[in-house]
Image (cartoon, grey):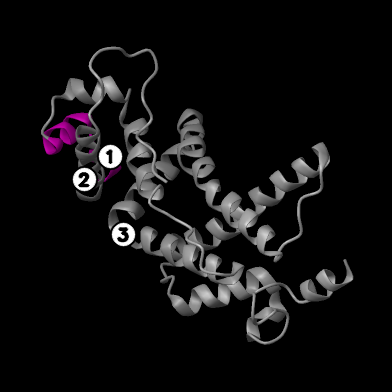
């Protein structure tokens, strides 16, 4: 699932070129790695992308918006293929996310915009809408798939059930994304297969799941007791 860069409202004229957008966003990430946030300018990006500076300003009002969109398209590469069970699905997306954050262009750009957003509320909201909210699609898909398999209970009908489901999905996203971001960008440690397996065991089964034998259903990755719950229904 891929999204194009966020268009500026109120602009008219020739249709935007996807090829030009790609060149600009790629040039933005490369320039940020080489120049840093302080050295990054719209002129520098335009030169690298081989376009006029006015072309950038027809699409983005400033470098804040440009850099967020340059990061957002990278996160749109994340996918959640059906790997047969919830445990495998989570491990797969964790490894994808970790590999994405290990790329210098992603790491530099994300850290720069997050740091800048601490004093810029508009930038903070753009990060939320262009990156965070868009990637919650993965939680929505994974949770629905697990419910269809019977690995997770169905949502409670009604408005209260919908609110609970929304809070649950927010929490799932925060726990998974927060752990991976901290691991890669704060601790500077790799998200490898061993870490992904251990994280998933902890996420699904709590501390008891870390030994790989207690706390988790070894076949489906379901929390212990899920099978008994299914039998009782």
37 inside magenta stretch: yes
Mark 3–mark 2 Cα distance, whole angstroms, equals 16 Å
Residue hosting label 1: 38
Where's residue 220, x and y in %? 64, 75
Mark 3 crowdedness (10 Å alpha carbons): few <14, some 14-19, many ≥20: few
Q: Which mark is residue 143?
A: none
Provide the secondary structure element on which disc 2 rests.
Answer: helix
Evaluate if marks 1 and 2 touch, with contact meaning CB atoms under 8 Å apart: yes
Q: Which region is colored magenta?
A: 36-49
121 inside magenta stretch: no
Where's residue 222, x and y in %? 69, 72
Residue 148 or 1: which is nearer the viewer?
Answer: 148
Provide the secondary structure element on which disc 1 rests.
Answer: helix
Mark 3 or 2 closer to N-term?
A: 2
Judge left or right: residue 63 versus residue 120. left
The quarter holding residue 207 reads bottom right
Residue hosting label 2: 35
Residue 218 or 188: which is nearer the viewer?
Answer: 218
Mark 2 crowdedness (10 Å alpha carbons): few <14, some 14-19, many ≥20: few
Judge left or right: residue 137 versus residue 5. right
Taking 172 as reference, is 6 above or below it?
above
Judge left or right: residue 197 versus residue 99. right
**SS majority, magenta:** helix
Q: Which mark is residue 103?
A: 3
């Amino acid at each position: 699932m891929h999204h194009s860069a966020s268009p500026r409202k109120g602009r008219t004229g020739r249709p935007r070129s996807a090829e030009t957008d790609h060149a600009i966003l790629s040039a933005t990430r490369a320039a940020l790695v080489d120049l840093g946030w302080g050295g990054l300018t719209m002129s520098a990006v335009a030169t690298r992308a081989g376009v006029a500076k006015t072309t950038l300003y027809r699409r983005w009002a400033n470098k804040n918006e440009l850099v967020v969109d340059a990061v957002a398209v990278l996160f749109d590469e994340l996918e959640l293929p059906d790997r047969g069970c919830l445990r495998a699905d989570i491990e797969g997306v964790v490894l994808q996310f970790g590999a994405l954050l290990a790329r210098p262009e992603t790491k530099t750009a994300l850290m720069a915009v997050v740091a800048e957003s601490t004093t810029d509320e508009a930038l903070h909201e753009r990060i939320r809408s262009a990156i965070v909210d868009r990637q919650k699609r993965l939680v929505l898909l994974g949770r629905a798939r697990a419910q269809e398999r019977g690995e997770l209970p169905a949502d409670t009908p009604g408005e209260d059930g919908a609110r609970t489901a929304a809070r649950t999905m927010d929490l799932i996203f925060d726990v998974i994304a927060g752990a991976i971001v901290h691991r890669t960008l704060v601790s500077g440690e790799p998200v490898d297969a061993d870490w992904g397996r251990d994280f998933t065991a902890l996420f699904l089964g709590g501390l008891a799941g870390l030994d790989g034998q207690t706390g988790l259903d070894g076949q489906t990755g379901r929390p212990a007791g899920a099978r008994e719950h299914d039998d009782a229904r």
